[in-house]
Image (cartoon, rainbow, N blue to C red):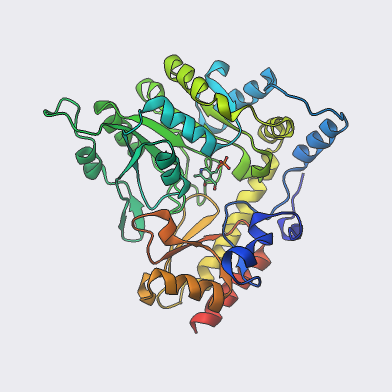
Amino acid sequence: MSYDFDKSPDRRGTLSNKWDRVGELFGNPEALPMWVADTDFECPRPVMDALRGRLEHPVFGYHFPPESLLEAIVDRMWEHHGWRIEPEWIVPGTGVITALGAALETVSDVGDEIILQPPVYYPFFSSVGDSGRRVAENRLILENGRYRMDFEGLKDLCRSKTTFPAREPRVAALVLCSPHNPVGRVWSADELEELGRICLERDIALVSDEIHCDLVLGGARHTVAASISEEMSANTITLMSANKTYNLPGLKSSFSIIPDEGMRRRFALASRGGGSPNSLGLVALEAALRDADGYLGALLEYLEENLEIFREGVADLTGVRLIEPEGTYLVWLDMRDLGMDDGDLARFMVHEVGLAPDYGFAFGAGGEGFQRINLGCTRDTVREAVTRLRAALS
Ligand SMILES: Cc1ncc(COP(=O)(O)O)c(C=O)c1O
Protein backbone atom coordinates (compact mmCIF):
# COMPACT_ATOMS: atom_id res chain seq x y z
CA MET A 1 0.00 0.00 0.00
CA SER A 2 1.56 3.30 -1.01
CA TYR A 3 1.10 6.65 0.67
CA ASP A 4 1.54 10.04 -0.91
CA PHE A 5 1.96 12.43 1.99
CA ASP A 6 2.34 15.34 -0.45
CA LYS A 7 -1.40 15.02 -1.02
CA SER A 8 -2.38 15.55 2.57
CA PRO A 9 -5.89 16.86 3.15
CA ASP A 10 -6.61 20.49 3.96
CA ARG A 11 -7.37 20.44 7.68
CA ARG A 12 -8.97 23.86 7.87
CA GLY A 13 -12.57 23.72 9.04
CA THR A 14 -12.19 20.34 10.78
CA LEU A 15 -12.02 21.73 14.35
CA SER A 16 -8.27 21.22 14.19
CA ASN A 17 -6.48 22.88 17.10
CA LYS A 18 -3.39 23.24 14.98
CA TRP A 19 -5.01 24.89 11.95
CA ASP A 20 -8.28 26.40 13.08
CA ARG A 21 -7.08 28.14 16.23
CA VAL A 22 -3.95 29.82 14.94
CA GLY A 23 -5.49 33.29 14.76
CA GLU A 24 -7.07 32.99 18.20
CA LEU A 25 -3.98 31.55 19.92
CA PHE A 26 -1.15 33.28 18.10
CA GLY A 27 -2.76 36.53 17.02
CA ASN A 28 -1.84 36.04 13.37
CA PRO A 29 -4.30 33.94 11.34
CA GLU A 30 -1.80 33.81 8.47
CA ALA A 31 0.95 32.18 10.54
CA LEU A 32 1.85 28.72 9.25
CA PRO A 33 0.81 26.24 11.96
CA MET A 34 3.84 24.20 12.99
CA TRP A 35 3.08 23.80 16.66
CA VAL A 36 1.01 21.13 18.46
CA ALA A 37 2.32 17.60 17.86
CA ASP A 38 -0.09 16.05 15.42
CA THR A 39 0.76 15.53 11.78
CA ASP A 40 -1.11 16.81 8.74
CA PHE A 41 -1.08 13.33 7.20
CA GLU A 42 -4.09 11.12 6.64
CA CYS A 43 -4.11 8.14 8.95
CA PRO A 44 -3.41 4.66 7.51
CA ARG A 45 -6.02 3.20 5.17
CA PRO A 46 -6.39 -0.02 7.24
CA VAL A 47 -7.36 2.23 10.15
CA MET A 48 -9.94 4.05 8.02
CA ASP A 49 -11.32 0.69 6.79
CA ALA A 50 -11.61 -0.61 10.34
CA LEU A 51 -13.34 2.59 11.47
CA ARG A 52 -15.77 2.48 8.53
CA GLY A 53 -16.54 -1.13 9.35
CA ARG A 54 -17.30 -0.22 12.94
CA LEU A 55 -19.48 2.72 11.86
CA GLU A 56 -21.74 0.27 10.08
CA HIS A 57 -23.05 -0.63 13.51
CA PRO A 58 -25.11 2.27 14.81
CA VAL A 59 -24.71 1.75 18.55
CA PHE A 60 -21.90 3.38 20.52
CA GLY A 61 -22.47 2.09 24.02
CA TYR A 62 -19.81 1.34 26.62
CA HIS A 63 -17.10 -0.95 25.35
CA PHE A 64 -14.18 -2.94 26.68
CA PRO A 65 -10.72 -3.54 25.17
CA PRO A 66 -10.82 -6.93 23.42
CA GLU A 67 -8.26 -9.73 23.89
CA SER A 68 -7.25 -9.23 20.25
CA LEU A 69 -6.08 -5.69 21.07
CA LEU A 70 -3.93 -6.91 23.96
CA GLU A 71 -2.45 -9.56 21.64
CA ALA A 72 -1.72 -6.88 19.03
CA ILE A 73 0.18 -4.88 21.68
CA VAL A 74 2.08 -7.98 22.86
CA ASP A 75 3.08 -8.77 19.26
CA ARG A 76 4.01 -5.17 18.56
CA MET A 77 6.31 -4.94 21.58
CA TRP A 78 8.10 -8.10 20.53
CA GLU A 79 8.34 -7.40 16.81
CA HIS A 80 9.26 -3.72 17.02
CA HIS A 81 11.13 -3.52 20.31
CA GLY A 82 12.27 -7.05 21.17
CA TRP A 83 10.38 -6.79 24.47
CA ARG A 84 8.39 -9.81 25.62
CA ILE A 85 5.39 -8.75 27.64
CA GLU A 86 2.32 -10.51 29.02
CA PRO A 87 -1.21 -9.39 28.05
CA GLU A 88 -2.13 -8.86 31.71
CA TRP A 89 0.60 -6.19 32.04
CA ILE A 90 -1.34 -3.91 29.68
CA VAL A 91 -3.77 -1.28 30.93
CA PRO A 92 -5.63 0.44 28.06
CA GLY A 93 -6.54 4.08 28.61
CA THR A 94 -7.70 7.32 27.09
CA GLY A 95 -4.43 9.17 26.66
CA VAL A 96 -0.82 9.27 27.74
CA ILE A 97 -1.16 12.42 29.82
CA THR A 98 -4.19 11.02 31.63
CA ALA A 99 -2.15 7.87 32.27
CA LEU A 100 0.77 9.97 33.52
CA GLY A 101 -1.50 11.42 36.23
CA ALA A 102 -2.46 7.90 37.30
CA ALA A 103 1.18 6.77 37.19
CA LEU A 104 2.22 9.61 39.50
CA GLU A 105 -0.51 8.65 41.93
CA THR A 106 0.69 5.04 41.75
CA VAL A 107 4.32 5.66 42.59
CA SER A 108 4.25 8.72 44.84
CA ASP A 109 2.34 10.57 47.52
CA VAL A 110 1.12 14.14 47.68
CA GLY A 111 4.08 16.39 48.49
CA ASP A 112 6.70 14.04 46.99
CA GLU A 113 9.17 15.30 44.42
CA ILE A 114 9.09 14.03 40.85
CA ILE A 115 12.15 14.49 38.67
CA LEU A 116 11.70 16.00 35.22
CA GLN A 117 14.53 16.62 32.78
CA PRO A 118 13.85 19.93 31.05
CA PRO A 119 13.58 21.22 28.48
CA VAL A 120 10.75 18.72 28.23
CA TYR A 121 7.15 18.31 26.99
CA TYR A 122 5.40 20.96 29.05
CA PRO A 123 2.30 19.03 30.22
CA PHE A 124 4.67 16.99 32.41
CA PHE A 125 4.97 20.06 34.65
CA SER A 126 1.21 20.50 35.00
CA SER A 127 0.69 16.76 35.58
CA VAL A 128 3.08 16.90 38.52
CA GLY A 129 1.60 20.13 39.89
CA ASP A 130 -2.02 19.08 39.39
CA SER A 131 -1.43 15.88 41.36
CA GLY A 132 -0.06 17.77 44.37
CA ARG A 133 3.52 16.62 43.76
CA ARG A 134 6.48 18.93 43.24
CA VAL A 135 8.86 19.13 40.33
CA ALA A 136 12.56 18.51 40.94
CA GLU A 137 14.55 19.52 37.89
CA ASN A 138 17.50 17.68 36.48
CA ARG A 139 18.28 19.75 33.40
CA LEU A 140 19.58 18.11 30.26
CA ILE A 141 23.06 19.21 29.24
CA LEU A 142 23.64 20.57 25.74
CA GLU A 143 27.17 19.79 24.61
CA ASN A 144 28.49 20.24 21.07
CA GLY A 145 24.97 20.44 19.66
CA ARG A 146 23.74 17.26 21.37
CA TYR A 147 21.81 16.81 24.58
CA ARG A 148 22.63 14.30 27.29
CA MET A 149 21.23 13.44 30.69
CA ASP A 150 23.06 14.81 33.72
CA PHE A 151 23.67 11.63 35.70
CA GLU A 152 25.80 13.34 38.34
CA GLY A 153 23.09 15.94 38.89
CA LEU A 154 20.57 13.15 39.14
CA LYS A 155 22.54 11.35 41.84
CA ASP A 156 22.76 14.57 43.83
CA LEU A 157 19.05 15.17 43.46
CA CYS A 158 17.92 11.82 44.68
CA ARG A 159 20.35 11.32 47.52
CA SER A 160 20.03 7.80 48.89
CA LYS A 161 17.28 7.19 51.40
CA THR A 162 19.97 5.82 53.68
CA THR A 163 21.29 9.38 54.08
CA PHE A 164 20.65 10.74 57.53
CA PRO A 165 18.76 12.91 58.14
CA ALA A 166 16.42 11.60 55.45
CA ARG A 167 15.83 13.94 52.55
CA GLU A 168 12.57 15.80 52.88
CA PRO A 169 10.46 15.79 50.72
CA ARG A 170 11.03 12.33 49.27
CA VAL A 171 12.10 12.03 45.65
CA ALA A 172 9.69 9.35 44.48
CA ALA A 173 9.89 9.08 40.70
CA LEU A 174 11.46 10.26 37.49
CA VAL A 175 9.43 10.92 34.36
CA LEU A 176 11.46 10.03 31.30
CA CYS A 177 10.59 11.29 27.83
CA SER A 178 11.92 8.70 25.38
CA PRO A 179 12.47 9.67 22.60
CA HIS A 180 12.75 13.11 24.08
CA ASN A 181 10.30 15.83 23.08
CA PRO A 182 11.46 18.52 22.25
CA VAL A 183 15.22 17.90 21.92
CA GLY A 184 14.86 14.83 19.69
CA ARG A 185 17.22 12.49 21.52
CA VAL A 186 16.68 8.75 21.16
CA TRP A 187 18.30 7.57 24.37
CA SER A 188 20.80 4.74 23.90
CA ALA A 189 20.54 1.44 25.76
CA ASP A 190 23.66 2.44 27.73
CA GLU A 191 22.14 5.74 28.82
CA LEU A 192 18.91 4.03 29.84
CA GLU A 193 20.81 1.38 31.75
CA GLU A 194 22.68 4.04 33.69
CA LEU A 195 19.47 5.93 34.39
CA GLY A 196 17.74 2.73 35.49
CA ARG A 197 20.62 1.82 37.79
CA ILE A 198 20.52 5.20 39.54
CA CYS A 199 16.75 4.94 39.97
CA LEU A 200 16.94 1.41 41.37
CA GLU A 201 19.76 2.26 43.78
CA ARG A 202 17.82 5.23 45.12
CA ASP A 203 14.39 3.59 45.10
CA ILE A 204 13.05 6.00 42.49
CA ALA A 205 10.27 4.67 40.25
CA LEU A 206 10.59 5.29 36.52
CA VAL A 207 7.63 6.53 34.51
CA SER A 208 8.67 6.28 30.88
CA ASP A 209 6.64 8.16 28.27
CA GLU A 210 7.51 6.39 25.02
CA ILE A 211 4.77 7.81 22.83
CA HIS A 212 7.31 8.72 20.12
CA CYS A 213 8.93 5.24 20.14
CA ASP A 214 8.31 4.48 16.44
CA LEU A 215 9.57 7.82 15.19
CA VAL A 216 13.30 7.22 14.93
CA LEU A 217 15.48 8.88 12.32
CA GLY A 218 18.88 8.41 10.73
CA GLY A 219 19.28 4.81 11.81
CA ALA A 220 18.73 5.50 15.52
CA ARG A 221 17.24 2.63 17.50
CA HIS A 222 14.68 3.03 20.24
CA THR A 223 15.15 0.92 23.35
CA VAL A 224 12.19 0.45 25.66
CA ALA A 225 13.58 1.40 29.08
CA ALA A 226 11.72 -1.40 30.85
CA SER A 227 13.19 -3.99 28.48
CA ILE A 228 16.74 -3.40 29.76
CA SER A 229 16.49 -5.78 32.73
CA GLU A 230 13.97 -7.53 34.95
CA GLU A 231 14.75 -5.10 37.74
CA MET A 232 14.03 -2.12 35.51
CA SER A 233 10.93 -3.77 34.17
CA ALA A 234 9.60 -4.17 37.74
CA ASN A 235 10.39 -0.52 38.53
CA THR A 236 8.86 1.06 35.43
CA ILE A 237 5.49 2.19 34.13
CA THR A 238 5.70 2.52 30.35
CA LEU A 239 3.24 4.87 28.65
CA MET A 240 2.51 4.43 24.95
CA SER A 241 -0.05 4.96 22.23
CA ALA A 242 -0.33 4.78 18.45
CA ASN A 243 -1.41 8.40 18.29
CA LYS A 244 1.78 10.15 17.21
CA THR A 245 2.85 7.58 14.63
CA TYR A 246 -0.52 7.10 12.97
CA ASN A 247 -2.02 10.52 13.71
CA LEU A 248 -4.94 9.42 15.89
CA PRO A 249 -4.78 11.62 19.02
CA GLY A 250 -8.37 12.83 18.60
CA LEU A 251 -9.57 9.23 19.03
CA LYS A 252 -8.28 9.17 22.61
CA SER A 253 -6.71 5.79 23.14
CA SER A 254 -3.44 4.79 24.78
CA PHE A 255 -1.99 1.93 26.76
CA SER A 256 0.30 1.56 29.75
CA ILE A 257 2.51 -1.46 30.37
CA ILE A 258 3.12 -2.32 34.01
CA PRO A 259 4.85 -5.64 34.72
CA ASP A 260 4.76 -5.32 38.53
CA GLU A 261 1.45 -6.63 39.83
CA GLY A 262 1.20 -4.37 42.88
CA MET A 263 2.03 -1.29 40.83
CA ARG A 264 -0.50 -2.34 38.24
CA ARG A 265 -3.25 -2.75 40.82
CA ARG A 266 -2.54 0.71 42.25
CA PHE A 267 -2.44 2.18 38.74
CA ALA A 268 -5.80 0.60 37.87
CA LEU A 269 -7.28 2.15 41.01
CA ALA A 270 -5.71 5.53 40.27
CA SER A 271 -6.98 5.55 36.69
CA ARG A 272 -10.57 4.51 37.33
CA GLY A 273 -11.77 8.08 36.69
CA GLY A 274 -10.10 8.08 33.25
CA GLY A 275 -12.34 5.35 31.83
CA SER A 276 -11.54 3.05 28.94
CA PRO A 277 -10.76 4.23 25.41
CA ASN A 278 -13.74 5.21 23.26
CA SER A 279 -15.20 2.65 20.88
CA LEU A 280 -13.58 4.09 17.79
CA GLY A 281 -10.25 4.62 19.52
CA LEU A 282 -10.07 0.91 20.38
CA VAL A 283 -10.77 -0.10 16.79
CA ALA A 284 -8.27 2.39 15.36
CA LEU A 285 -5.53 1.43 17.82
CA GLU A 286 -5.75 -2.26 16.99
CA ALA A 287 -5.83 -1.69 13.22
CA ALA A 288 -2.87 0.70 13.45
CA LEU A 289 -0.75 -1.72 15.45
CA ARG A 290 -1.63 -4.76 13.35
CA ASP A 291 -2.09 -3.63 9.78
CA ALA A 292 -0.26 -0.37 9.15
CA ASP A 293 3.43 -1.26 8.93
CA GLY A 294 3.67 0.00 5.34
CA TYR A 295 2.55 3.38 6.62
CA LEU A 296 5.28 3.62 9.23
CA GLY A 297 8.05 2.94 6.69
CA ALA A 298 6.66 5.52 4.25
CA LEU A 299 6.17 8.05 7.04
CA LEU A 300 9.76 7.73 8.28
CA GLU A 301 11.11 8.17 4.76
CA TYR A 302 8.97 11.27 4.26
CA LEU A 303 10.02 12.74 7.61
CA GLU A 304 13.70 12.20 6.77
CA GLU A 305 13.22 14.19 3.57
CA ASN A 306 11.34 16.95 5.37
CA LEU A 307 14.20 17.15 7.82
CA GLU A 308 16.72 17.33 5.00
CA ILE A 309 14.84 20.24 3.38
CA PHE A 310 14.63 22.07 6.68
CA ARG A 311 18.25 21.32 7.62
CA GLU A 312 19.54 22.65 4.28
CA GLY A 313 17.20 25.64 4.44
CA VAL A 314 18.49 26.89 7.78
CA ALA A 315 22.11 25.75 7.52
CA ASP A 316 23.53 29.15 6.55
CA LEU A 317 21.21 31.33 8.65
CA THR A 318 23.12 33.43 11.13
CA GLY A 319 21.86 33.03 14.67
CA VAL A 320 19.87 29.86 13.96
CA ARG A 321 21.11 26.38 14.70
CA LEU A 322 19.23 23.13 14.24
CA ILE A 323 19.64 20.57 16.99
CA GLU A 324 19.92 17.42 14.94
CA PRO A 325 16.98 15.17 15.91
CA GLU A 326 17.39 11.42 16.24
CA GLY A 327 13.67 10.90 16.64
CA THR A 328 10.18 12.50 16.64
CA TYR A 329 8.91 14.80 13.88
CA LEU A 330 9.69 17.85 15.99
CA VAL A 331 12.81 19.94 15.52
CA TRP A 332 14.40 22.09 18.18
CA LEU A 333 15.87 25.31 16.86
CA ASP A 334 18.49 27.14 18.85
CA MET A 335 17.87 30.84 18.16
CA ARG A 336 19.70 32.20 21.19
CA ASP A 337 22.33 33.91 19.06
CA LEU A 338 19.68 36.25 17.66
CA GLY A 339 19.94 37.92 21.05
CA MET A 340 16.18 38.39 21.57
CA ASP A 341 14.37 37.79 24.83
CA ASP A 342 11.57 35.20 24.77
CA GLY A 343 8.78 37.73 24.25
CA ASP A 344 10.56 39.36 21.33
CA LEU A 345 11.47 35.99 19.82
CA ALA A 346 7.85 34.82 20.01
CA ARG A 347 6.63 38.03 18.35
CA PHE A 348 9.33 37.74 15.72
CA MET A 349 8.37 34.13 14.87
CA VAL A 350 4.64 34.78 14.66
CA HIS A 351 4.47 38.27 13.19
CA GLU A 352 7.67 38.72 11.20
CA VAL A 353 8.46 35.17 10.10
CA GLY A 354 4.79 34.10 9.93
CA LEU A 355 5.19 30.77 11.72
CA ALA A 356 3.22 29.42 14.67
CA PRO A 357 5.77 27.28 16.58
CA ASP A 358 5.86 26.05 20.16
CA TYR A 359 7.88 28.59 22.13
CA GLY A 360 10.96 27.07 23.71
CA PHE A 361 10.52 28.69 27.11
CA ALA A 362 7.28 26.70 27.58
CA PHE A 363 9.39 23.54 27.89
CA GLY A 364 11.00 24.74 31.11
CA ALA A 365 14.55 25.56 32.09
CA GLY A 366 16.95 25.51 29.17
CA GLY A 367 14.20 26.18 26.61
CA GLU A 368 14.73 29.94 26.55
CA GLY A 369 15.82 31.18 23.13
CA PHE A 370 14.67 27.97 21.39
CA GLN A 371 11.63 27.20 19.23
CA ARG A 372 10.04 23.82 18.49
CA ILE A 373 8.91 23.31 14.91
CA ASN A 374 6.65 20.45 13.84
CA LEU A 375 7.80 18.86 10.57
CA GLY A 376 4.89 16.41 10.45
CA CYS A 377 3.52 18.26 7.46
CA THR A 378 3.75 18.31 3.68
CA ARG A 379 7.01 19.15 1.96
CA ASP A 380 5.34 22.27 0.57
CA THR A 381 4.68 23.43 4.12
CA VAL A 382 8.30 22.77 5.11
CA ARG A 383 9.54 24.70 2.06
CA GLU A 384 7.19 27.57 2.86
CA ALA A 385 8.44 27.63 6.46
CA VAL A 386 12.04 27.80 5.26
CA THR A 387 11.21 30.57 2.78
CA ARG A 388 9.53 32.60 5.51
CA LEU A 389 12.38 32.10 7.97
CA ARG A 390 14.99 33.08 5.40
CA ALA A 391 13.04 36.16 4.30
CA ALA A 392 12.58 37.41 7.86
CA LEU A 393 16.22 36.84 8.76
CA SER A 394 17.76 38.25 5.60
C1 LIG B 1 5.97 13.15 25.00
C2 LIG B 1 4.48 13.25 24.84
N1 LIG B 1 3.68 12.64 25.73
C3 LIG B 1 2.32 12.71 25.62
C4 LIG B 1 1.73 13.42 24.60
C5 LIG B 1 0.23 13.52 24.54
O1 LIG B 1 -0.36 12.26 24.56
P1 LIG B 1 -1.93 12.12 24.73
O2 LIG B 1 -2.57 12.98 23.70
O3 LIG B 1 -2.16 10.66 24.52
O4 LIG B 1 -2.25 12.55 26.12
C6 LIG B 1 2.54 14.06 23.65
C7 LIG B 1 1.93 14.87 22.58
O5 LIG B 1 2.55 15.67 21.97
C8 LIG B 1 3.94 13.97 23.78
O6 LIG B 1 4.77 14.56 22.90
Looking at the image, residue 193 sits to the left or right of residue 14; the answer is left
Q: Quadrant of residue 167?
A: top left
Looking at the image, residue 200 sits to the left or right of residue 93; the answer is left
**What residue is rendered at 32% in x and 50% in y?**
140
Rendered location of residue 81, percent (x, y): 52, 32
Rendered location of residue 55, percent (x, y): 84, 34
Find the residue positioned furthest to the bottom: 394
The residue closer to the viewer here, 368 or 112, is 112
Q: Is residue 144 above or below residue 206?
A: below
Find the residue positioned furthest to the left: 164
Q: Quadrant of the N terminus?
A: top right
Rendered location of residue 231, percent (x, y): 35, 21
Ligand 1 - quadrant of the structure image: top right
Rendered location of residue 119, percent (x, y): 38, 53
Q: Quadrant of residue 335?
A: bottom left
Q: Is residue 247 above or below residue 262?
A: below
The residue closer to the viewer here, 147 or 392, is 392
**What residue is rendered at 38% in x and 59% in y?**
367
| Residue 84 seen in this snapshot | no
**What residue is rendered at 45% in x and 30% in y?**
103
Q: Is residue 74 above or below residue 243?
A: above
| Residue 25 seen in this snapshot | yes
